[in-house]
Image (spheres, grey):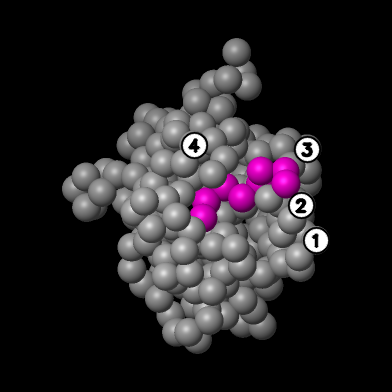
Amino acid sequence: MLRASVVVFPGSNCDRDVQVALEKITGFPVKMVWHGDASVPASDLIVLPGGFSYGDYLRCGAMAAHSPIMRDVIAKAKAGTPVLGICNGFQVLCESGLLPGVLMRNASLKFICRDVTLRVDNVETIVTKCYRKGEVVRLPIAHAEGNYFADKETLDRLEGEGRVVFRYADAAGEATPEANPNGAQRNIAGICDASGRIVGLMPHPERLFELSLGGADGRRMFESALLSAIETTV
Ligand SMILES: NC(=O)CC[C@H](N)C(=O)O
């Protein structure tokens, strides 16, 4: 069983897409939670979806990080509830301090909307255990601020602890500068916390979770979440 909740901020998008993907894949109903609510129901997975929360004012995710619901999301995350942040959700995780670093404007200063190829570097997180290490997958990106930045010490720590989950890479799995769409340090597309229970990534797995959408490489992220929930309850 997977009890998943999706947080909805003013300006969120793909929140419904995440709900549909999770419900179709797992068969369990997903709760939508409003940003002004005081708490999230007991969950095996909290998703912070993509979009333009609070109109992206100040910096993407900066205002959402201070919304009423985030107090409980942060408390639950610190107590061990798995959290997945997708695109704007990743920005919210960084802005709220649950993940290190920050997402800056794309190096091109342009909004980029296209598919990218990624290498899966960590297959021990709550949303990647159904992938193979080093596997190359295709997922869409759609962002203006996906340029991951952290100081050298933080980047070295993330790499040393295996906390880079996804890297922009070419079809052969090489993390080349050409494969990097936004200037992200070390081609980082997604990272996790030390436990592998809090994961943030810029690409959108819910936009390619079944073949009718043009691809299904995102599907195993949601299958992984279900598997993680089953593993922790048995
Ligand atoms: N797709 C998204 O979640 C967009 C995130 C954010 N608004 C940006 O442009 O960077």
Q: Is residue 112 above or below residue 160?
A: below
* Contact (Cβ within 8 Å) of mark 2 with mark 3: no
Q: CA distance from mark 4 to mark 1?
A: 25 Å
| Horizontal arrangement in the rendering, residue 195 relative to residue 20 (left or right) | right
Q: Nearer the viewer, mark 2 or mark 3?
A: 2
Residue at left 66%, top 43%?
162
Name the secondary structure under disc 4.
loop
Between residues 189 and 174, which one lies in front from this camera angle?
174
* Contact (Cβ within 8 Å) of mark 2 with mark 1: yes
Instruction: State the extent of the magenta-drawn residues as a range.
Output: 160-167
Q: Tell me which amino acid carries mark 2.
A: Arg
Q: Nearer the viewer, mark 1 or mark 3?
A: 1
Q: CA distance from mark 2 to mark 1?
A: 6 Å
Name the disc covering residue 157, or none: 2
Q: Is residue 112 visible?
A: yes
Residue under circle 3? 79
Residue at left 22%, top 52%?
214
Name the secondary structure under disc 3.
loop
Residue under circle 1? 153
**Mark 2 vs 4, N-terminal side:** 4
Name the disc covering residue 133, or none: 4
Q: Tell me which amino acid carries mark 4.
A: Lys
**Mark 4 vs 3, N-terminal side:** 3
Q: CA distance from mark 4 to mark 3?
A: 28 Å
Residue at left 59%, top 37%?
125
Q: Which x, y percent locates residue 76?
A: 73, 42
| Horizontal arrangement in the rendering, residue 41 relative to residue 21 (left or right) | right
For residue 69, what is the image quadrant? bottom right
